[in-house]
Image (cartoon, rainbow, N blue to C red):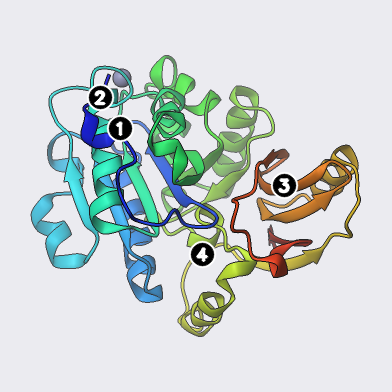
Amino acid sequence: MFDQSLESSSLQPVPSIGVPALVVSGFLGAGKTTLIRHLLHEAQACGYRMAVVSNEFGELGIDKAIFGQESNAHYVELEGGCVCCQLSNELLTTLHDLWKLHNPDRIIVETSGVALPFETLVTFWREPVVHWVGEALAVVVVNAEQFVEGRDIEGTTEQQISSADLLVVNKIDLVTEKAVRRVESMLADMAPGTPILHSVNGKVDSAILFPPHPDDEGRLNVRKKRDIIPHTHEQFVAEEIIIKSGISKDSLILQLQKLIALRVKGVVRTSEGIWLVQGVGSRIQLVSPPRDLPKNLIGRIVAIRRI
Ligand SMILES: [Zn+2]
C-alpha cells in the first residue's frame, strides 16, 4: 500500500483534538485559489501554521512563486493525475510527511476542477493519517456567474456540489441579488440541507471553515482584535454553549440542530460517555475523544451562527 516510513514511527505528539483539514473543490475558475489565499492570509495573521497540498493544474492553481512571496505556509504540488483517484496514495504519503516534518495547525487540499471532493476526503480516514487528523471537511466553491448563465452545471459540478459539506457561492458581486437567490435554490435542490456561504473574492470567515474550539481561547482573542479591520465578510458570531453532563446522544444532537448553526464543535459527557462533537449545518457527528483530553473542555460547545 504505502511505504514503511509512513508507519507511526514519529515521536511527534498527536494533537489533542486533531489537525483540522479542508478539501477545496470547485469547477475551474470558481475561485478556489483566491479562497485559499485568503485563508492563508488569515492563518498567518493569527499565527497558525498552514500546510497546503495543491492538485490544481496550470496557471489557476496557486503558483509556487506567488505562494512563496505571500505566505510562510508549507506548500506541495501534486501533479501527473488526480488526487481523488490516480494519486490518492501519493496524497496520503504527502499529508503524513507534511505532518511529521512541519506539524501544521491546519491543512488544505486544493483539488483540480474535475476531482470529486468526497473521494479526496476519504484519504483523511486512511492509516496513518487518520490518527492525527481532526475534522475533515469538503468545501465546494461555486462561481455565481457561471451558475446564473447555466454554464457546465451538469456532470462534475453537480457531483461535486451534491457531496459537499459546505458550499461557498463566490463572485456574488458580479450578479444581481435576485440571481444569488436563484443560485441558492438551485444548490438547495442539488444538495438539500448543505450550508451555503456567500463570498466576494473568496473572503469567507476562517472561523467557519476552521471553527474555534474551547481550547483555542487565547487565539480567539487575537482574532477578535484583528477583526476590527473592515472587510466584506458575511457577519457571524461564535458563542459558547454549556451542555450538562448526562444528556442522551439523541437529545444532544436535536438540541444542536435546533441552533441552526453553521458549525459546532466541542466536548460533551453524554449518558453514553464522553464524545468529541463536531457539526456542519444539520450534520452533527459524535466521535471518540482524544485520550489526553483536558477536563475543562467537557460540556463546552462553540457554535458559529449568522448574525
Ligand atoms: Zn480523481
- In this rendering, would 258 be left or right of 233? right
> Gap between marks 4 and 3, in whole Å?
32 Å
Residue sitting at 74 percent across and 68 percent down? 240
Sequence-first disc among 1 and 4: 1
Locate residue 238, reporting x and y percent: 67, 67
Sequence-first disc among 2 and 1: 2
Locate residue 124, reporting x and y percent: 42, 34
Q: Which SS class for mark 1?
A: helix
Task: Give, as a three-letter code, the residue at label 3.
Answer: Trp
Residue tagged 1: 92
Sequence-first disc among 2 and 4: 2
Locate residue 281, reporting x and y percent: 68, 43
300 to 164, vertically: above or below? below
Are the residues flagged by discs 2 and 3 in contact, CB closer than 8 Å?
no
Residue tagged 3: 275
- In this rendering, would 65 be left or right of 97? left
Sequence-first disc among 1 and 3: 1
Residue sitting at 27 percent across and 18 percent down? 1
> Gap between marks 1 and 4, in whole Å?
33 Å
Relative depth, front residue between 36 and 104: 104
Are the residues flagged by discs 2 and 1 in contact, CB closer than 8 Å?
yes
Task: Give, as a three-letter code, the residue at label 4.
Answer: His
Residue tagged 2: 2
Q: Quadrant of ligand 1?
A: top left
Sequence-first disc among 4 and 3: 4
Residue tagged 4: 233
Q: Which SS class for mark 4?
A: loop
